[in-house]
C-alpha cells in the first residue's frame, strides 16, 4: 500500500508565497514522476506542474503558473515540493499531489487527499 501525504496549504494574500510538500511512503519500488494538480470550485482538475525522477528531472508547467511556481523533488525522501510565489486569487483551489509509481510489479497512479490553497485579494 502507498500513501501520499500533502502539507503546506493555507490562506495567503495576493502576492504572497506558499510551499507545498508531498511525501510518498509505503511499498514503493520506483517513482516515474510526481506532480501537482489543482481543482477550483466548478472547474475541472488541471495539471499545475510535474517532474520526472530521472537524472536532472524534466519539469512541465501549466502556462498560468510559469515563472511563478517551481516544482522540485527529493528522490531519497520520495518527496515533491511546489514553491508558489506571486500568488493570485485565481490560484485558489484544492491542490492534489500525484505520483506515477511502481509498487510490486505493477504501475499505479496515486493521489493525495488534497490541500486547500486560498489566495485573498
Image: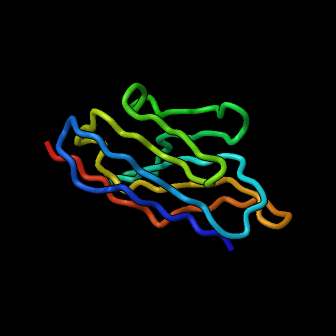
Residue at x 76%, y 54% (from the top left corner): 30
Residue at x 27%, y 56% (from the top left corner): 10
Residue at x 71%, y 52% (from the top left corner): 31
Report whether 90 appears left or right of 32.
Answer: left
Give percent across and percent down for residue 81. Answer: 49, 46
Residue at x 61%, y 54% (from the top left corner): 77
> In the orientation shown, which residue stands out farthest toward the left?
121
- Image height of 43 relative to 17, above or below: below
Q: Is residue 44 visible?
A: no
Give percent across and percent down for residue 4. Answer: 56, 64
> In the orientation shown, which residue stands out farthest toward the right?
105
Q: Quadrant of the N terminus?
A: bottom right
Name the image quarter holding residue 16: top left
- Image height of 103 relative to 47, above or below: below
Q: Quadrant of the C terminus?
A: top left
Quick one: 58 or 91, which is closer to the camera? 58
Report whether 57 appears left or right of 90.
Answer: right
Report whether 107 appears left or right of 53.
Answer: right
- Say how the picture is coloured: rainbow
Give percent across and percent down for residue 106. Answer: 82, 63
Q: Is residue 92 visible?
A: yes
Name the image quarter holding residue 73: top right
Quick one: 39 or 117, which is closer to the camera? 117
Give percent across and percent down for residue 33. Answer: 66, 46
Report whether 38 appears left or right of 31.
Answer: left
Name the image quarter holding residue 67: top left
> In the orientation shown, which residue stands out farthest toward the top?
67
Amino acid at each position: 500500500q502507498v500513501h501520499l501525504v500533502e502539507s503546506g496549504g493555507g490562506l495567503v494574500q495576493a502576492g504572497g508565497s506558499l510551499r507545498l510538500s508531498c511525501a510518498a511512503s509505503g511499498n514503493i519500488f520506483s517513482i516515474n514522476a510526481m506532480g501537482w494538480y489543482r481543482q477550483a470550485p466548478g472547474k475541472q482538475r488541471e495539471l499545475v506542474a510535474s517532474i520526472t525522477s530521472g537524472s536532472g528531472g524534466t519539469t512541465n508547467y501549466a502556462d498560468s503558473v510559469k515563472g511563478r511556481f517551481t516544482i522540485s523533488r527529493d528522490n531519497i525522501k520520495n518527496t515533491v515540493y511546489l514553491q508558489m510565489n506571486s500568488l493570485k486569487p485565481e490560484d485558489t483551489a484544492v491542490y492534489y499531489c500525484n505520483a506515477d509509481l511502481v509498487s510490486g510489479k505493477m504501475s499505479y497512479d496515486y493521489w493525495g487527499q488534497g490541500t486547500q490553497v486560498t489566495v485573498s485579494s
